[in-house]
Image (cartoon, grey):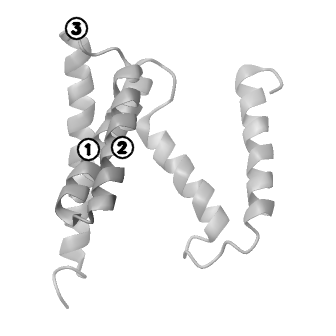
Amino acid sequence: MSLKGGLGFRRLKIFMHTKIKELSAKRIKYLIEKQIPFYEGNKTYLKGLREELKEVEEEIKENNSVYLEDELGDVFWDYLCFLHSLENEGKITSADSVFKRCYKKFGERVGFDGNGGHNWQEVKDKQKQELKIEHNKLYNNDR
């Protein structure tokens, strides 16, 4: 078995994912504690995401995988920083809660083995109802 397909490679991917999440959380904490002037909360990274996505679009046109991967890394970084900013502002529970919701949402829609998706709209409609119930419980109102 090659390293790429082996358990060691999977552990490395999980390790890298965890470390980049930790690094982005530390960065936001630093920006807040030191009151760095350019940091305007989640707006900073929402703007950054828009700019980086434009750069991704350009690299796709150029058909250059090296620069495209670099720009996609920037998108991922800005997304993580955006999530941590929202978390620090109390707008979301945590970055992990977003990932958990995403996994549940798309796991239900496409099947946790990735082979589903035949009743996408039906599952989506059911999920919307569940979100509405959760929202109403949390905020005690209708949406």
Q: Quadrant of the N terminus?
A: bottom left
Say which element carries label 2: helix
Q: Nearer the viewer, mark 3 or mark 1?
A: 1
Q: Mark on residue 54? A: 2
Residue type, label 1? Asp
Say which element carries label 1: helix
> Which residue is painted at 76% across and 70% down in the image?
119
> Which residue is painted at 27% across and 32% down in the image?
25
Residue type, label 3? Gln
- Label 3 vs 2, first from the N-terminus: 3
Q: Mark on residue 35? A: 3
Q: Mark 2 packing: few (<14 Cα in 10 Å), some, or many (20+)? A: few
**Position of residue 19 measured from the top left corner of the image (x, y, whole percent):** 21, 47
**Front residue of 69 and 97:** 69
Labelled pair 3, 2 in contact (Cβ < 8 Å) = no
- Determine whether, in the image, residue 64 is placed left or right of residue 122: left
Q: CA distance from mark 3 to mark 2?
A: 28 Å
Q: Nearer the viewer, mark 2 or mark 1?
A: 2
Say which element carries label 3: loop
**Position of residue 36 measured from the top left corner of the image (x, y, whole percent):** 20, 11
**Front residue of 83 and 140:** 83
**Position of residue 46 measured from the top left corner of the image (x, y, whole percent):** 41, 29
Q: Dot 1 corresponds to which residue?
A: 74
Residue type, label 2? Lys
- Determine whether, in the image, residue 94 is placed left or right of residue 6: right
